[in-house]
Amino acid sequence: MHLRLITKVLGLLLMVFSLSMLPSVLVSFIYNDGIHDAFILGFLITLFTGFAIWIPVRHHQADLRTRDGFVITVLFWVVLGLAGSIPITLAPAATETFTDSFFESFSGLTTTGATVITGLDELPKSLLFYRQQLQWMGGMGIIVLAVAVLPMLGIGGMQLYRAETPGPMKDAKLTPRIAETAKALWYIYFSLTLVCTLAYWAAGMTLFDAISHSFSTVAIGGFSTHDASIGYFDSPAIELIAVVFMILSAANFGLHFVAWRSRSVKHYLLDPEYRTFLMIVAGLSVMTIGLLVFTRTYDPVTSVRYGLFEAVSILTTTGFGTADFALWPLFGPFMLILASFVGGCAASTAGGIKVIRSMLLMKQGLREIKRLIHPNGVFPLKVGKRPVGDRVIEAVWGFFSMYILVYALILFGLLATGMDFPTSWSAVAASLNNLGPGLGSVAAHYGAIPDTAKWLLCIAMLLGRLEVFTLLVLFSPQFWRS
Amino acid sequence: MHLRLITKVLGLLLMVFSLSMLPSVLVSFIYNDGIHDAFILGFLITLFTGFAIWIPVRHHQADLRTRDGFVITVLFWVVLGLAGSIPITLAPAATETFTDSFFESFSGLTTTGATVITGLDELPKSLLFYRQQLQWMGGMGIIVLAVAVLPMLGIGGMQLYRAETPGPMKDAKLTPRIAETAKALWYIYFSLTLVCTLAYWAAGMTLFDAISHSFSTVAIGGFSTHDASIGYFDSPAIELIAVVFMILSAANFGLHFVAWRSRSVKHYLLDPEYRTFLMIVAGLSVMTIGLLVFTRTYDPVTSVRYGLFEAVSILTTTGFGTADFALWPLFGPFMLILASFVGGCAASTAGGIKVIRSMLLMKQGLREIKRLIHPNGVFPLKVGKRPVGDRVIEAVWGFFSMYILVYALILFGLLATGMDFPTSWSAVAASLNNLGPGLGSVAAHYGAIPDTAKWLLCIAMLLGRLEVFTLLVLFSPQFWRS
Ligand SMILES: [K+]
Ligand SMILES: [K+]
């Protein structure tokens, strides 16, 4: 463990992160909302904390190793989550307790999008902007981690992507590759956001709302500047734009990179994971719309409109809302929350188990049936035309079982606070899958649940964002030995 | 597929099964409860149906193959479940619809123990006896299937037991082995039941209740002759006897066989699966008692008494009750229902995923953490001192994922009938794990839920009893080819 190196990286991260509070100072002056001090103070506290951490170890040189990667990845979210909560704590009338401030910041940064704040429409513009920007930065962090760091760590079968990701990836050192890959991903991420902003603006949002919502769309975050979320605009055009960009943002950003470099969209349709994702989108939308039509919840046209939007929003784990899906009849709410366990593609800003892992689990289950019928047959498991090694499949199974285990444990914790079952099971799913909205008492916001529950859900968000194992590894005694 | 041979086996099975209705005729005469006709008629219908099926193919000779084994195993439960429902349908005032009669019979035979009948205390004695006996026969069938048939079929990693089970097991033909193994198991099963009966009788039950409850204890069935279940007797001695025999019946019957042959109990403590099971029993009991003490639900002594009983009853998937655990506070009901997913040991009368599979899943999950830390390390997976092949682990994962998949699908179905969430999720768990009692509207009995839901739950019971794959295989087109 290179403790000094880790400290140095964190110090640098904090100093860079402190800059993210400056745009809100500008927004505060533009709209004259009177809370610029919160961001200026937040900027100074974060900057100087980072500087104080960095200065004693600034001359330390060493190569980052895999083991350091685990620690930095975990601290990245926790420390930036803490720093992000500073302006929210300082801003008057946003949240009342530190728990709420941290929950809001962490939910933003992890792109979960669960909020404890009600009355968004009356909130100072700069604070609204800041929340949206937290999600946007979190999304960027996820992609860099997912494309550049996690495959290297070998989390949950993601070594699968080692050979495919852009750049020379087989080296054991982290640093040079991250910088190079991050730059390419940054361009793609920024371009997607820009196009999304222009589209929202053209469809009738104010420029402020267009920027804000493009941030939380591309990050698959789900924060909004209105309590009614996307439903506030009541515009089929805006909803369609959101649907398109949610579907785009749920793609593997390595795939965006390949498509961009070759100036061709055919890669999207050739990629087995994205193809499967699109089929799941289609299937879930049809089922949702069918349910709404069949139960006469809405007229057919409205069913298509709301059904498509909510299916895409929940499956991709965005969590935007146009209709209150928690109140839909029969198995509607259960089906959608369950779909969020699948989530989007690996190395996207989406949460959940990810499409590629779900595919592998399903394929292996079906292979077992074949094996029962032909006990001596050989059935290699393939993704597209590429065979997948047993080692990868075992890692995916390990991931899956730990995912379910932590789900159950946190659910225990929530029930222990006295929360009811529908609220608890959906809240854990919505946090672990980085989805946001749940059912029951957390359908609209998370303000009314006990503080203990909020902290447990923060752990769930972190576990989800860290693909479970990155955090679990740190609790293993072997990790700390030599 | 040897269709004629399958028909012949089923015809024989029905003729043998018809005899099971005769003891109830005797009971009906002893207690003069006036419903002997139902059993005489049931006996005749079943006997002649079996005879009519058997007679055209009685001279057919062929060796049973693996593929026939799947079909016979599935038909075994469905056909005997149907036959078992005849006397229940014919008996006046027991059930009102065929759905209810079949549900009761099938729930009995699969040792699920979910009942649609209320007012058990007023039911004719012969019908009560018949229900208990259904469970006892079902339990016998499960053990023969689990020890002799399923390892051969290679369901869900159970090829693990192929080498360990008594008798020459490596042959591909089923018939001689079943007969030989079944005889040994029969002696053990009968002895356990006899000792259990005597213990209950000595502790104060009537002989009728002692026999009836020993049937459903050893079969891990959970049917009772009283609405209040074991709670009716309000006797710590009886509860302790039930706990001991539930724990014994949840052991692998192959283990009983080894222990019996060598006249030594040390095998129980040396067996890795049974040892783990005992640790889970201890852990769950402590947690349950702790919860009851901590929440002041009962005084400490009563907490120990009820906590231990319910923990053992639910974990082993027996489903006897002394207290209404569905109303216990916080996460108590959730924890117990979740524990029933683990269930008892393989090749016992218990339901659930089974301890050995849960162990393998957990071990593999932990191995993934080791592998993340030491990517090039070799970590063989062992049960006791025996290494477990990757092929077995893959089969167990396949089993696990299909278990969860069918759980979710049937839960969808139940929610679609309009049932509420706590009732639905617990009902599916209680049926798939062959447990019996659930939460919400199915805490006491299953009489009040829609007919569609009852049929869906029968499918869940069948899937649970058949270790999921035996049934799923039949839906695979490849199975029916050549
Ligand atoms: K989200
Ligand atoms: K049972």
Image: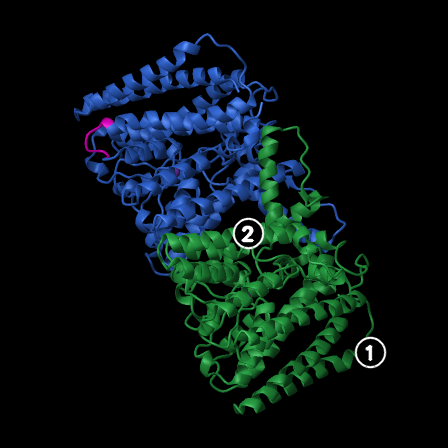
Chain colours: A blue, B green
SS class, disc 2? helix
Estimate the x, y position of residue A162 in percent, counting from the top left: 59, 27
Estimate the x, y position of residue A315 in percent, counting from the top left: 44, 44
* Crowd tier of the residue under label 2, counting other residues whose Cα lies within 10 Å: few below 14, some 14–19, many 20 or above: many
SS class, disc 1? loop
**Residue at horizontal 30 percent and vertical 35 percent from the top:** A99
Residue identifier under label 2: B280
Span highlighted in magenta in the image? A90-95
Snapshot quadrant of residue B440: bottom left
Three-letter amino acid code at the position of disc 1 = His
Snapshot quadrant of residue A89: top left
The main secondary structure of the magenta stretch is loop
* Crowd tier of the residue under label 1, counting other residues whose Cα lies within 10 Å: few below 14, some 14–19, many 20 or above: few
Residue identifier under label 1: B59
Q: Chain of mark 1?
A: B
Foreground residue among A482 and B455:
A482
Task: State yes or no: residue A93 in magenta.
Answer: yes
- Are callouts 2 and 1 both on one chain? yes
Q: CA distance from mark 2 to mark 1?
A: 51 Å
Tell me the quadrant of ligand 1. Answer: top left
**Residue at horizontal 22 percent and vertical 28 percent from the top:** A91
Foreground residue among B218 and A283:
B218
Q: How many marks?
A: 2
